[in-house]
């Protein structure tokens, strides 16, 4: 077996965690898989895997070599895929996870246009605010506004920026007054967002002279979705802090009014995430390119700020 084939077997063994599962996945015999690993270790002159009756684990050399193999094999596959995709449209099935709030961003009308451009591609959309395990659940990618830790197995590609917008309905502000400083929020009913995964209340973020300042909002209403917070704020239930993307349309049509705009803070940008141990297939690249161009790169705050300036309000 040539070295590239042995490298592919090695990567699959590591990913599957067992020779037998890797053999099934590769449609090879277990003996062939074992032979390929032995052949690779002999050529390199190092042990790549520690083998016991219960489990496999990477040696220090094996861990380093695994990362190199993933990178090399990914570059080869992507080069081949780019040649193929130049001649044909992305095809197959694209499985993508999106949060529920994305329905408010004209996602499905845009998705319809994307599918029209790639008629041989099938798309499965999983709408959930749950943290999805892309590898275990067989997802190609996910759209999420989350921080990706440096040691994550995921790769993140920025689609657009985001800011936290604090806002309330004109009726609420007329009845309860407009907060003039962050401390004034203590006298207001704040609509609290509770993370469905951690069950914790999200702190509100503000920029104070270039430094991030956070407070824990107080109020009699908690919701587990940010679009729910927008809906509640539109009814006059209180003040909410939500991403500018979700507040954009209600602000532009006058249903919500931004407050404390001099303390606007950046939020986590919207990311396209995909497993880092895979090259980026043509179907995912096409999906990413389409939505990168469909949404404003800097987010919705610049357009909101322009509206406020036109109305005579100062925007930071």
Image: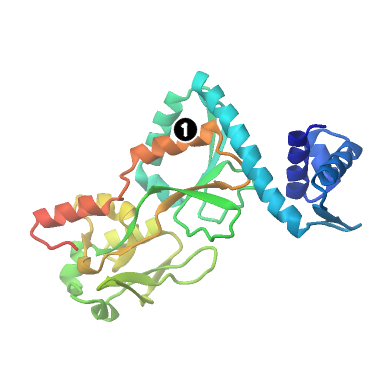
Q: Secondary structure at mark 1?
A: helix
Residue count near mark 1 (Cα–Cα under 10 Å), binned few <14, some 14–19, many ≥20 = some
Q: Is residue 63 above or below residue 111?
A: below
Residue drawn 46% across the image and 62% down it: 224
Identify residue for label 1.
Answer: 286
Taking the spot 54% from the left edge, 43% from the top edge, the residue there is 141
Place residue 31 in its image quadrant. top right
Residue 103 position within the rendered picture, expressed as x and y whole percent measured from the top left? 40, 45
- Specify whether 73 is left or right of 44: left
State which quarter of the image contains the C terminus.
bottom left
Q: Residue furthest left?
A: 312
Above or below, 202 relative to 255: below
| Front residue of this view, candidates 143 and 247 | 143
Q: Is residue 73 visible?
A: yes
Residue 37 falls in which quadrant of the image?
Answer: top right
Q: Residue at x 52, y 69 (%)?
A: 199
* Nearer to the camera, 229 or 118: 118
Q: Would you say residue 259 is visible in this rendering? A: no
Label count reads: 1
Task: Name the image colouring.
Answer: rainbow
Residue 20 pos. (x, y %): 86, 44
Image coordinates of residue 270 in percent, x first then y, are 41, 51
Does residue 316 lie above or below 63 as drawn? below
Quadrant of the drawing holding the N terminus: top right
Q: Position of residue 225 (x, y in %)?
A: 43, 59
Seen from the viewer's position, the closer of residues 129 and 145 is 145
User: Residue shown at 74%/38% (left/top)?
Assistant: 8
């Amino acid at each position: 077996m040539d070295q590239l084939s042995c490298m592919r077997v090695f990567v699959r063994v590591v990913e599957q965690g067992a020779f037998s599962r890797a053999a099934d996945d590769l449609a090879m015999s277990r003996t062939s898989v074992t032979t390929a690993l032995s052949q690779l270790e002999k050529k390199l002159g190092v042990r790549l895997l520690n083998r016991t009756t219960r489990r496999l684990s990477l040696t220090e050399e094996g861990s380093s070599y695994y990362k190199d193999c993933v990178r090399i094999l990914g570059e080869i596959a992507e080069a081949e895929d780019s040649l193929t995709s130049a001649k044909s449209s992305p095809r197959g099935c694209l499985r993508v996870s999106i949060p529920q709030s994305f329905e408010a961003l004209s996602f499905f009308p845009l998705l319809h246009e994307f599918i029209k451009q790639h008629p041989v591609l099938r798309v499965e959309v999983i709408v959930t605010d749950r943290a999805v395990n892309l590898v275990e659940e067989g997802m190609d990618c996910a759209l999420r506004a989350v921080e990706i830790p440096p040691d994550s197995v995921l790769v993140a590609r920025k689609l657009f920026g985001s800011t936290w917008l604090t806002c309330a309905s004109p009726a609420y502000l007329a009845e309860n007054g407009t907060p003039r400083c962050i401390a004034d929020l203590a006298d207001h009913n704040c609509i609290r967002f509770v993370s469905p995964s951690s069950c914790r209340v999200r702190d509100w973020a503000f920029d104070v002279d270039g430094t991030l300042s956070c407070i824990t909002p107080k109020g009699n209403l908690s919701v587990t979705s940010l679009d729910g917070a927008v809906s509640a704020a539109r009814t006059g239930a209180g003040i909410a802090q939500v991403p500018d993307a979700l507040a954009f349309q209600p602000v532009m049509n006058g249903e919500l009014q931004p407050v404390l705009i001099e303390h606007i803070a950046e939020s986590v940008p919207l990311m396209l995430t995909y497993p880092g141990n895979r090259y980026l297939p043509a179907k995912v690249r096409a999906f990413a390119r389409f939505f990168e161009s469909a949404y404003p790169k800097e987010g919705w705050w610049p357009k909101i700020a322009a509206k406020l300036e036109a109305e005579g309000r100062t925007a930071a």
